[in-house]
Amino acid sequence: MLQLLKVTGESLSPLYKEGDFVVITTLPFFLRRLRQGNIIVFQHGLYGTLIKIVERVLLDEDAVYVIGANEDSLDSRRLGPISRAAIKGRVLWHIAKPTH
């Protein structure tokens, strides 16, 4: 399945900016094949829905480490590893916010 989500916040700036959209896939086929550099959306108990870049896949823990493009981004340095069960989707397409 595909979902359209609106980007909020600046954690992936300048790659993705507030107001941009992303299309994610929730199909297990894509979620099982995560690699470094993939951009994922996941659910965090305290911070809600987050979008980050996969920095490292931890096969033995069934988890990933994530980073943001912005150096002030909340990422695995503070969140720790992200369980695959928390991952909601992988970004397939980025749609930049229209500029006027």
Image (cartoon, helix red, strand yellow):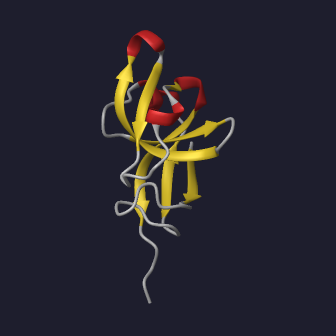
The outermost residue toward the bottom is: 100
Is 57 rendered above or below residue 37? above
The outermost residue toward the top is: 60
Looking at the rendered structure, the number of numbered marks drawn on it comes to 0
**Quarter location, residue 47:** top right
Is 35 rendered above or below residue 16? above
Where is residue 95? Give x, y as percent.
Answer: 43, 65
Q: Which residue is drawn at the image coordinates 46% and 74% (left, top)?
A: 97
21, 63: nearer the viewer: 63
Where is residue 58? Give x, y as percent.
Answer: 39, 18
Where is residue 3? Give x, y as percent.
Answer: 58, 51
Is 93 rendered above or below residue 60? below
The outermost residue toward the left is: 36
41 relative position to 49: left or right: left
Quadrant the C terminus occupies: bottom left
Q: Which residue is drawn at the image coordinates 46% and 55% (left, top)?
A: 11
**Quarter location, residue 26:** top right
32, 63: nearer the viewer: 63
Where is residue 74? Give x, y as percent.
Answer: 50, 45
Q: Which residue is drawn at the image coordinates 38% and 55% (left, top)?
A: 70
Quadrant the N terminus occupies: top right
Q: Which residue is drawn at the image coordinates 47% and 61% (left, top)?
A: 10
47, 91: nearer the viewer: 47
